[in-house]
Amino acid sequence: MTNARTAELPHDRPVHALALVIEPFSGQPTRVPLPDDGEIEIGGLWAGAGDGRVGIPDPAVSARHARIEIREGRARIVDLGSRNGTWVGGARVEAAALSIGACAIVGRSAVALEETTDFVCEAAELPGAIGSSPAMYRLAAQVRSYAALQAPVLIRGESGSGKEVVARALHQLSPRRDGPFQAINLGALPRELAEAELFGHERGAFTGAAGQRAGVFELADGGSLLLDELGELPLDMQAKLLRVLETGEVRRLGARAPKRIDVRVMAATWAPLEQRILDGSFREDLFHRIAVLMVDVPPLRERRSDIPAIATALLARSLDFAEKALSPAAASRLASESWPGNVRELRNVVYRAAALSPGALVDAGDIARALAGRGSQPPPRTTRDPRTA
């Protein structure tokens, strides 16, 4: 084995009640309970669960690829002389300690540990999202429990973490799924046009209003509306938004009478609204009207085992590099990063690495060069929004 070394990952605490999450290069994730003390082997499809062996549908996985060992509450992965190696943190390893959430690459598939004490059922998947980490399953379970309700939802999370994906999932899982879904970025609205964009206008309501126009509340009638970057809305517009939420009616600019609407409102923000209430830039009554239900979207660093699958999907959906693939070393290198810019930053790095790669396989060296240029390139073009949350 070349470039082999032993890697140690930090342990916050001994691990108990573990399951092994296996995300094959193609196919559905599976979960295998791990013994309190013992071991299992992972390899090609020759293996069968239940006899100390687990098979992975991945041609890049050797027949006897690696072994997961549990000893005295600690877990580690041991390579068994595999053809393509076992990778942790971007390095090929002979053995590596694994902590909760740590991700290893075998062949072109990812394996990770999770605790099973608060595990939700496998049916709790999130439409439009990629990932089967514990954080994603908890998020999916929460979204499903809120989807059938009518109350407003406040979705909180860092920029690029997938708040709109969560909002769309709430809509798709709701009784309103056949109705419209509208989204508006309040932070990008010109102040003078904000009211017209939200509530609409009649002809002649202001200079340039040559005709009638419905606002996003009317366009979302019978469906769902996402108010993105709610914390950026000016105070005067906050008061008008609160009135609409309280009455369920909108009045177009220049209109004589209001119009009744049936809309489920969702709001998204990265901003700490509670702090903005204290400094006077956000209305407390609007906060309590919106934050009836709250969903916190985990950042990418809290679901590292999802990163290889997300990166693979991002590359496959690129208009320029859909024919390229990630090597195990590249996937492992990506999984070792903290990604302060979340999925948006990951998308840029993957695209840049593919552009730097001379061949069809993006390797760890390409990832390293792409990481060195963080923030210097425009976002890549994609065929559609990546299914990430």
Image (cartoon, rainbow, N blue to C red):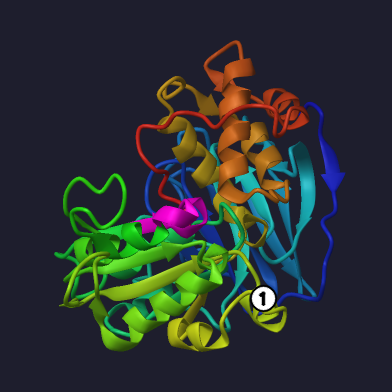
Decide if residue 291 is on the left or right side of residue 79: left
197 or 322, nearer to the observer: 197
Neighbourhood count class around disc 1 (C-alpha, 10 Å): few under 14, some 14–19, many 20 upward: some
**Residue 314 position (above or below residue 136):** above
Where is mark 1, residue-wise? 276
Q: Would you identify the image quadrant in which residue 263 lies?
A: bottom left
Horizontally, is 332 left or right of 389 in the view?
right
Q: Residue at x 70, y 38 (%)?
A: 333
Who's the residue at 16% across and 65% down the image? 179
In the picture shown, does residue 263 fall above or below 334?
below
Q: Residue at horizontal 48%, vertical 61%?
A: 163
Question: Of the residues shown, which amino acid type is indicated by label 1?
Answer: Arg
Determine whether, in the image, residue 356 is placed left or right of residue 373. Answer: left
Classify residue 266 by image quadrant: bottom left
Q: Percent from the top left, x then y, of residue 166? A: 42, 64
Q: At 52% across and 83% down in the image, what residue appears?
A: 287
Vertical relation: 349 (above or below) 124:
above
Along the line of sight, which residue is nearer the eye, 145 or 205? 205
- Give the residues drawn in magenta, as a range: 183-193
Residue 131 % position (x, y): 48, 56
Q: Which image quadrant: the N terminus?
A: top right
Position in image of residue 110 (x %, y %): 56, 48
Residue 337 spot, x, y in % from top left: 73, 46
In the rendered image, the residue lying farthest to the top is: 358
* Residue 169 in view in this figure: no
Q: Tell me: 240 left or right of 232.
A: left
Residue 46: quarter of image: top left
